[in-house]
């Protein structure tokens, strides 16, 4: 078996494969394109926080060590350290700096994983490449001469001191980045719809349980509960609550077009900016699976649970609710990996 991706979803899958009696490096291998552990967390900005305390942000088998720095929501570096020690603890034998170019069909029994380090024959392939390497930026008419970057490129607020910064996007990343940059710069926030803030006492624990209930309801043919969407979009971590207290969490409607010095609004007025930060999400990184011809009209691969319907030798994990309830989160990846391995 070949697991593609050594981030949280790949490691959780490796844990359950090992617990089922398979030997890392012999019965299964985890391939990761990155040179260092930590998955996407190693590429995120340093002040990014998880949405849950450590006890609710752990992979199976070993609890994330407590974060004692402040309010209990660990920084990205703490997660990277945890994932680094996790793969060593369970001797998961992650092969690093190995990029996967494509997966093709071999004989009736095997898929062929074509990599920068040669080809692998596998009776089962688990794709766990996530979304971070495929940032999405919407298309607008016009062009902007200033600096543009995506969430994936953001590092620190000090890069924007005394600038005029437009932040586009209505999710958690946008809110956390806005909270930081608004301390040092003039910020404007644009969202497709008015931002919806979760109650202060709701964090990732509650969100995961809601996503799980919705998934179960769908499986049983019961009415859609609405899941997380019924509560809101943005978790009120400390920095966002502090920004609320400073009265800077105000969003305005989307603009009509880009102009050389900024944007033009739908009423014809224009605003000037030095930088635009697109906090507009990511898309699943599935290019290595394109040769299998599995994508549906929505660009996703139809699955039954985590298994690809048109190619049962392929399983997917960590891309969102369509591959398991909250499977793109630390706690969700673990529970999805458990079910994935149980159904091999």
Image: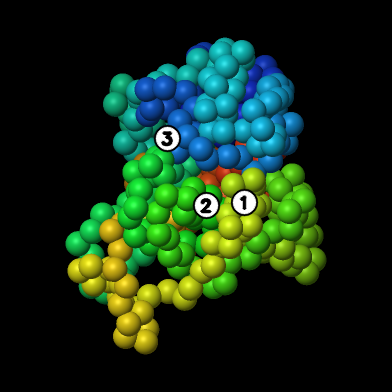
- The residue singled out by tag 2 in the image is 179
The quarter holding residue 262 reads bottom left
Residue 99 horizontal/vertical position (percent): 34, 30
Which label's residue is closer to the chain start, 1 or 2? Answer: 2
Q: CA distance from mark 1 to mark 2?
A: 8 Å
Quadrant, the C terminus: top right
In the displayed structure, does residue 274 sit left or right of residue 106? left
Residue 235 horizontal/vertical position (percent): 65, 52
Would residue 282 be seen by someone viewing this image from the given angle? no
Residue 57 horizontal/vertical position (percent): 67, 35
All told, the count of numbered labels is: 3
Which label's residue is closer to the chain start, 2 or 3? Answer: 3
Would residue 300 be seen by someone viewing this image from the given angle? yes
The quarter holding residue 270 reads bottom left
Q: Which mark is residue 43?
A: 3
In the displayed structure, does residue 268 sit left or right of residue 247? left
Compared with 210, 12 (above or below) is above
Q: Residue at x 56, y 13 (%)?
A: 88
Residue contact between numbered discs 1 and 2, judged by CB atoms under 8 Å:
yes
Q: Residue at x 37, y 87 (%)?
A: 267
Circle 3 SS class: helix
Q: Residue at x 54, y 73 (%)?
A: 193
Compared with 93, 98 (above or below) is below
- The residue singled out by tag 1 in the image is 242
Q: CA distance from mark 2 to mark 3?
A: 20 Å
Q: Residues within 10 Å of mark 2 (few under 14, many from 20)?
A: many
């Amino acid at each position: 078996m070949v697991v593609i991706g050594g981030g949280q979803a790949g490691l959780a899958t490796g844990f359950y494969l090992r617990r089922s009696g398979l030997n890392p490096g012999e019965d299964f291998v985890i391939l990761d394109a990155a040179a260092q552990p930590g998955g996407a967390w190693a590429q995120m900005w340093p002040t990014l926080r998880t949405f849950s305390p450590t006890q609710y942000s752990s992979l199976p088998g070993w609890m994330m060590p407590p974060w004692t720095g402040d309010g209990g929501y660990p920084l990205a570096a703490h997660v990277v350290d945890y994932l680094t020690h996790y793969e060593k603890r369970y001797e998961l034998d992650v092969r690093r700096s190995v990029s996967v170019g494509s997966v093709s069909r071999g004989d009736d029994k095997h898929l062929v994983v074509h990599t920068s380090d040669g080809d692998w024959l596998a009776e089962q392939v688990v794709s766990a490449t996530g979304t971070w390497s495929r940032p999405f930026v919407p298309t607008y008419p016009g062009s902007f001469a200033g600096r543009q970057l995506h969430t994936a490129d953001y590092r620190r607020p000090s890069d924007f001191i005394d600038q005029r910064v437009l932040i586009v996007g209505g999710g958690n990343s946008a809110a956390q980045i806005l909270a930081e940059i608004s301390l040092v710069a003039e910020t404007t926030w644009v969202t497709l719809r008015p931002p919806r803030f979760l109650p202060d006492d709701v964090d990732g624990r509650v969100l995961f349980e809601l996503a799980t209930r919705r998934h179960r309801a769908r499986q049983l043919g019961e009415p859609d509960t609405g899941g997380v969407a019924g509560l809101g979009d943005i978790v009120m971590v400390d920095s966002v609550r502090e920004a609320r207290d400073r009265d800077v969490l105000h969003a305005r409607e989307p603009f009509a077009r880009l102009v050389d010095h900024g944007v033009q609004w739908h009423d014809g007025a224009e605003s000037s900016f030095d930088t635009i930060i697109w906090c507009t999400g990511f898309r699943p990184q599935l290019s290595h699976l394109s040769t299998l011809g599995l994508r549906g009209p929505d660009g996703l691969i139809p699955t039954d649970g985590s298994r690809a319907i048109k190619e049962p030798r392929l399983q997917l994990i960590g891309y969102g609710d369509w591959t398991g309830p909250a499977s793109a989160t630390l706690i969700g990846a673990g529970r999805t990996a458990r079910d994935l391995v149980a159904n091999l």
